[in-house]
């Protein structure tokens, strides 16, 4: 099949990456890192999450971070919002887009947010009404859609029902999240194919974790199903604080490099991303996970060693 010419990658390191780190990063360091990311050519960055400061202390400075960064025309700033209080903070901080999160299974939803999937969805209603009254765009996401660490595969009927309810709420922009890296290309094709068949009007994106080394293969399966929007995190930082042993997002440099090698344009300056990745890797060595930071780019050619002289 022919691959698309262009894809769009959203950088999620400042949110998904940072929130998994045990050491609190000073606000000015976050601002500095995001300012560097803003220069890479991304069209969207997930900068933070407006969760309760006690839930994720690392992101309690969400408002200050947004106030401190150098905004750039054409780069949308997205943030996670779990409730009305968070939405008010996000509006005040002038984010362009919010992301509402829910889990595909009740077990994951209850362990993560203390409520069932459909109860969480009901609580979205007042947020959507409030957001409509502002300039903030609303998107949604479905965590553990490709497999739940507590329940395994999610029935297709349940996925269809979640998507239908999202559409009933007026949300078409949906991120499919492989939160604990349980997807494989066949599953991606089955689930994305099913959603597209029932809801062709939905604008789908993928949020892939590389827990079992399958994230890039899953991205290609998504591409084959027509998805051209992907999340990734520089240096592969990020896990899920609620998922046991979940490792990071697919590294941005791996995803960008892979696409560019295939002739698919990302619009992102890979060398700038690698520079930021090296800094993050140096600072958080045990949390980074990136092939390109280890091996370099395919185009980094080496000088061939001289052939060894034959013995004797
Ligand atoms: Zn994630």
Image (cartoon, helix red, strand yellow):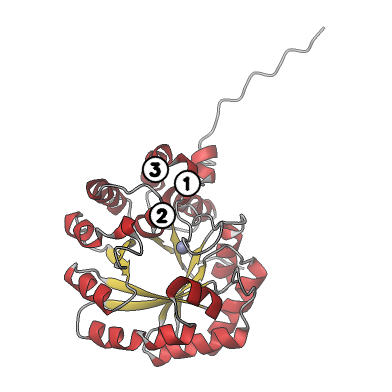
Q: Position of residue 4 (x, y in %)?
A: 50, 66
Q: Residue at x 50, y 69 (%)?
A: 177
Residue nearer the viewer, 190 or 270: 190
Name the residue that disc number 2 marks.
Answer: 17
Query: Circle 1 is placed at which residue position?
Result: 287
Q: Is residue 212 left or right of residue 208?
A: right
Q: Position of residue 28 (x, y in %)?
A: 22, 47
Residue located beneath label 3 in the image: 280
Q: Residue placed farthest to the top in the image? A: 312
- Mark 2 lies on a secondary structure that is helix
Q: Earlier in the sequence, mark 1 or mark 3?
A: 3
Name the spot of residue 189 as percent of width and height, x first: 62, 74
Contact, CB < 8 Å: mark 3 with mark 2? yes
Q: Against 238, is 193 above or below?
A: below
Q: Is residue 200 visible?
A: no
Q: Secondary structure at mark 3?
A: helix
C-alpha gap between disc 1 and disc 3: 9 Å
Separation of residues labelled 3 and 2 (CA atoms): 10 Å
Distance between mark 1 and mark 2 Cα atoms:
9 Å
């Amino acid at each position: 099949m022919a691959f698309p010419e262009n894809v769009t990658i959203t950088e999620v390191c400042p949110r998904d990456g940072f929130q998994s780190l045990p050491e609190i990063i000073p606000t000015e360091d976050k601002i500095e890192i995001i300012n560097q990311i803003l220069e890479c050519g991304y069209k969207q960055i997930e900068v933070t999450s407006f969760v309760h400061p006690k839930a994720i202390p690392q992101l309690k400075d969400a408002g200050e971070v947004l106030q401190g960064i150098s905004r750039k025309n054409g780069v949308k700033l997205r943030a996670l919002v779990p409730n009305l209080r968070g939405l008010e903070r996000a509006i005040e901080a002038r984010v362009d887009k919010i992301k509402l999160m829910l889990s595909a299974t009740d077990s994951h939803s209850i362990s993560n947010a203390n409520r069932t999937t459909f109860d969480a969805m009901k609580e979205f209603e007042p947020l959507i009404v409030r957001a409509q009254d502002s300039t903030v765009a609303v998107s949604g996401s479905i965590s553990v859609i490709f497999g739940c660490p507590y329940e395994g595969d999610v029935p297709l009927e349940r996925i269809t029902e979640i998507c239908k309810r999202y559409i009933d709420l007026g949300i078409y922009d949906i991120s499919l999240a492989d939160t604990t890296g349980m997807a494989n290309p066949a599953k991606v094709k089955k689930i994305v194919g099913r959603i597209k068949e029932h809801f062709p009007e939905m604008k789908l994106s993928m949020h892939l974790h590389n827990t079992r080394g399958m994230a890039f293969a899953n991205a290609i399966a998504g591409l084959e199903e027509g998805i051209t929007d992907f999340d990734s995190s520089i240096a592969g930082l990020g896990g899920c604080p609620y998922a046991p042993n979940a490792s990071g997002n697919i590294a941005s440099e791996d995803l960008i490099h892979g696409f560019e090698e295939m002739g698919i344009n990302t619009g992102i300056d890979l060398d700038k991303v690698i520079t930021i990745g090296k800094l993050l890797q140096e600072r958080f060595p045990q949390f980074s996970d990136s092939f390109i930071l280890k091996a370099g780019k395919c185009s980094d050619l080496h000088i061939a060693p001289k052939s060894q002289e034959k013995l004797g």
